[in-house]
Amino acid sequence: MSFFDALKADELASTVQYMDPVSFEAGALILAEGEPGNECYLIDDGRVRLEVHSNELDSDAVLDHLEPGQVLGEFCLFDRGVRSASAYADTAVTTRRLTRASFDTLCDEKPRLGMTLLTHMAGDFTHKLRQMNLKLKHFIFRGKTPAWLNDMVARARTAQVEFADWPEDQVDAIIKDIAEAVLARTEELAAAAVKETGLGVFEHKVQKITLACQLTRDDLVGRTAHGVLDPATQHLVTEIACPVGVVLGLIPLTNPVPTMVFKSLICLKSRNALIVSCHRNALGVGNQVGELIQGVLAGYGANPDLVQWVKERGSRATTAALMAHPGVAMILATGGPSMVKAAYSSGTPAIGVGAGNAPVWVCPDADPAAVARMVIASKSFDNGVICGSDNNLLVDAAVRRAFVEQLEANGAAVLTGYEIDRFTESVFDETDHLRRELIGQSAVEILRQAGLSRGEDVKLIIVPVENDKVDGLWGLEKLAPIISLFTTSGVEDALALCRRILTNMGSGHTAIIHTNDRELALRFAHEMRASRVLQNCGGATGCIGIGNGLRHSWTLGCGSWGGTSTTDNVGYQNLLNIKRLAVGT
């Protein structure tokens, strides 16, 4: 019940004089974490979302939602501290703002009403505390799994058992038709992804969806993923492939459509069922993709429950319950480190990914013009949100000048002098990470946010820094069209700097070298703690197997270096139990 509902007409008239009516559009920031709190808001209408700051796009940072009748921000009136979380208008919101000074005046002039308001705020505070205790209890003592979730897993298991022995040609036909169904809606899905997530470039989303459909389809069709794998080569030992069962697929905010398509196709190829959990800011486009896939399944007489998804805004509790559900056989976790850690801690077998932060060594024998074009095309692709994209340039002093000239000639802005200091102060937060609202934005927009301008055609921002900055913010992952540039002198210096970068962040993911010296490339590969070492490739496309011989994948393992279970570009092969029939000798 609202505080105002308990007041008589004359009391209401007296009380509202101390408050200001304030409205917020959906998405607006109402309170910012870390700022001093001098007022609170009594919510009349709409819903407010409370979030804590997080540098991980795919981690759920939502603490709670407040509804009409509740109070926002009263903690700071009580303890005079700073805001412990940010508050956003989840819908359009109307409120009454009460400042600390107005509250003090109300208590002095109308003490009974002041006490009534204080009692209401204390009651709301107590309600929040009780809710927090219930959530904490759920994580300490695992609560009862919701009935709808049990039903979803049960239906997935039933569908998987029915599908387990489908012949290869029928499965391939389904895969081809799903790819075609998504391809026919590529532009619509790309536009929806950009609008809903606020990340990336429409044209590049189109390319990613197209590549995910075509390359995954081509990689799967015609392969054997069930029963005896290769009778011609198996004599004493015969390998027999079986599905693992129900797979939980966690989908990242950066690549929702390609990743959901990819995981659906490899699960179907391996005769597994898939339950998808999208990031809350990609639910809409996830629903569209899911409906397309289920439509194709139904057309072939397959059970549509083979591919299901969480259709409404989920929570950490929902995801945790799915991860630990006894009916889920495996987790495919693509997303931030916290999500992957939760997957590995769930007790369910999991395949996860790790953070990227690829060092890019430009050797003395590299072609400056060719490498400059490749780096710009790679790191500006979809505004730099692919985790395996180029993040740190290490350029040998012998080719640095020519390389920088080629970067500028091909659309990069190479910052100098005061620009570097101003840019650094503007785009990083207090934790030395790129400000979250700049992730996946264009180079032009990021420069504008920093108060700099290099024209409207800038594709990539290059920030030359001293080598001693490699252990700080400039040596970390930057999911935007921003790349640091370090200068190296000789092989040993470059190798040592590359190793330091991967130690800071990105261990196990991707490292890149531009050289025509095969022996040097082999030494680089030997010394880098990276699952994918690319020679003369751009990171954004090279890491997922485009333009080289790697398996095409949108789930990239990082091995024990990155705290994951495999170094593979994950595919359907990772979703099979392989039996081995061994003949006695």
Image (tube, rainbow, N blue to C red):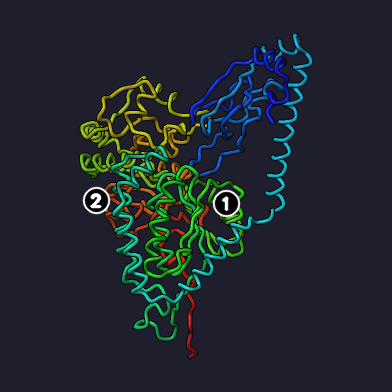
Q: Earlier in the sequence, mark 1 or mark 2?
A: 1
Which residue is drawn at the image coordinates 61% and 38% (left, top)? 63
In this picture, is 216 found above or below 335? below
Circle 1 sits in a helix, a strand or a loop, which is it? helix
Q: For marks 1 and 2, give the CA distance.
A: 47 Å
Q: x%, y% of residue 504?
A: 48, 41
Tell how many labels. 2
Q: x%, y% of residue 512?
A: 34, 48
Which amino acid type is shown beneath numbered disc 2? Asn
Q: Nearer the viewer, residue 391 or 499?
A: 391
Extreme residue toward the front, this view: 9
In this picture, is 183 found above or below 198? below
Residue 496: quarter of image: top left
Q: x%, y% of residue 395?
A: 31, 38
Q: Nearer the viewer, residue 478 or 14?
A: 14
In this picture, is 494 found above or below 446? below
Side of 165 relative to 120 (left or right): left
Which residue is drawn at the image coordinates 31% and 51% (left, top)? 185
**Which residue does the numbered mark 1 point to in the structure image?**
319
Which amino acid type is shown beneath numbered disc 1? Thr
Q: x%, y% of residue 327?
A: 58, 65
Q: Nearer the viewer, residue 367 or 51?
A: 51
Identify the disc placed on residue 516: 2
Residue 349: quarter of image: bottom right
